[in-house]
Amino acid sequence: MPAFSRFLRYFMTVGRLGSIRRAADELNISASAIDRQILNVEAELGMPLFERLPTGLRLTAAGEIMMASGMRWQKNLTDVRAQIEDLRGLKRGHVDIAIIDALAKGYIPAAIHAIQSRYPGITIGVRVIENDKVRGAIANGEVDFGIMFEPQSFRELTVRAFVDVVLGFVTPAGHPFGQQREARFTSCADSALIVPAEPLAVCHQIAVLEGTSGIQLDKKVTSDNIQMVTSLVLQGVGIGILTSLDIITEVKRGLLSFTRISDPILRPMTLALCTAATRTPSYAAGIVLAEIENGFAQLSYPASITPGGDLDA
């Protein structure tokens, strides 16, 4: 184990930096020692882990497999250490979470603040990534759990909690359009719009509405960043199309209004808190998971968009 762990540490640093010399500087180890470890394993495997290029080293297909395995090994070692700490009765450990962009404000930061206050020995890493990549990160063991849209078709995931999230029009507070609680999609036909772009999960729903309604949208701006869409709406550039989840913070602060799109063809999206079906969360991950699960219902529609509501976990 020690020799293998040493090789992995050397190998993964070289893979990340693309250079044995830079890896040697970072690890404070001689370049020849790192090179020897890698050459020995390449000889044992019978194939190279790196392409030696004039500009540096690049992972081969075998190297990419080794890198993915190393990441899983590091995560498993962290979990083992956390379980050993559990035996000592210490609430310590590191927990990695993957979430979609819409959760980078509001409930999740508030929940993490509450967890850190109660369990200062637990550290948390938060990855904000695309919806499909959240699924992969959970299934591959890169994170302890994640929150994503529409998980039900993936057998490798276990859904711990879920809420309904709906699509709607977003307007600045006081805008006449925002006085409506619900409206049909065709009601935006003559309005300047700010519309999400791929890879945001709502794009498919908007495409369905465009196809079934037959209207030509006046898309003044498109963006793949929810915060950008929100900011443009606040600036008065146009009416935004987002989910109830995306604008929780701004609606609760009285800055924006949300009008649900009421077309019958449109069904709510499922936002789910998921773990890997084949892995048991560590003690520290279980603590964080339970804290987030307990308050998960406040992300649902319509509770999530009640002006003046409480965002605390």
Image: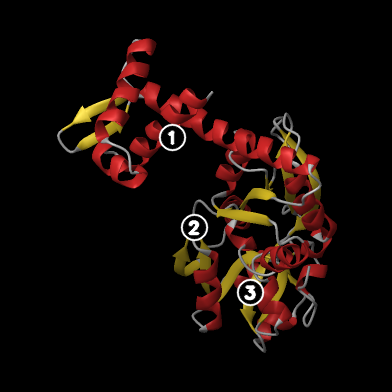
Q: Quadrant of the C terminus?
A: bottom right
Q: Position of residue 172 (x, y in %)?
A: 62, 83
Q: Residue at (73%, 83%) from the top-left corner? A: 179
Kind of residue sitting beneath label 3: Val
Which residue type does callout 1 highlight? Arg
Q: Residues within 10 Å of mark 2 (few under 14, many from 20)?
A: some
In this view, the residue in front, 117 or 208, is 117
Residue 170 disc label? 3
- What residue sits right under mark 2 in the picture? 197
Mark sitting earlier along the chain (3/2): 3
Comparing labels 1 and 3, the label whose residue is closer to the camera: 1
Marks 1 and 2, Cα distance to the nearest angstrom?
A: 39 Å
Q: Residue at horizontal 67%, vertical 89%? A: 174
What SS does tag 2 mark? loop
Residue hosting label 1: 9
Q: Secondary structure at mark 1?
A: helix
Label 1 or label 3, whichever comes before in sequence order? 1
Front residue of this view, candidates 206 and 302: 302
Q: Residue 248, relative to residue 294: is it above or below?
A: below
Q: Earlier in the sequence, mark 1 or mark 2?
A: 1
Q: Residues within 10 Å of mark 3 (few under 14, many from 20)?
A: many
Q: How is the image coloured?
A: secondary structure
Q: Is residue 95 visible?
A: yes
- Taking depth in this image into account, of 266 and 275 the one nearest to the observer is 275
The percent position of residue 126, horizontal first and vertical second, equals 59, 55
Q: Quadrant of residue 277?
A: top right
Quarter holding the N terminus is: top right
* Residue 162 tag number: none
Against 247, residue 68 (above or below) is above
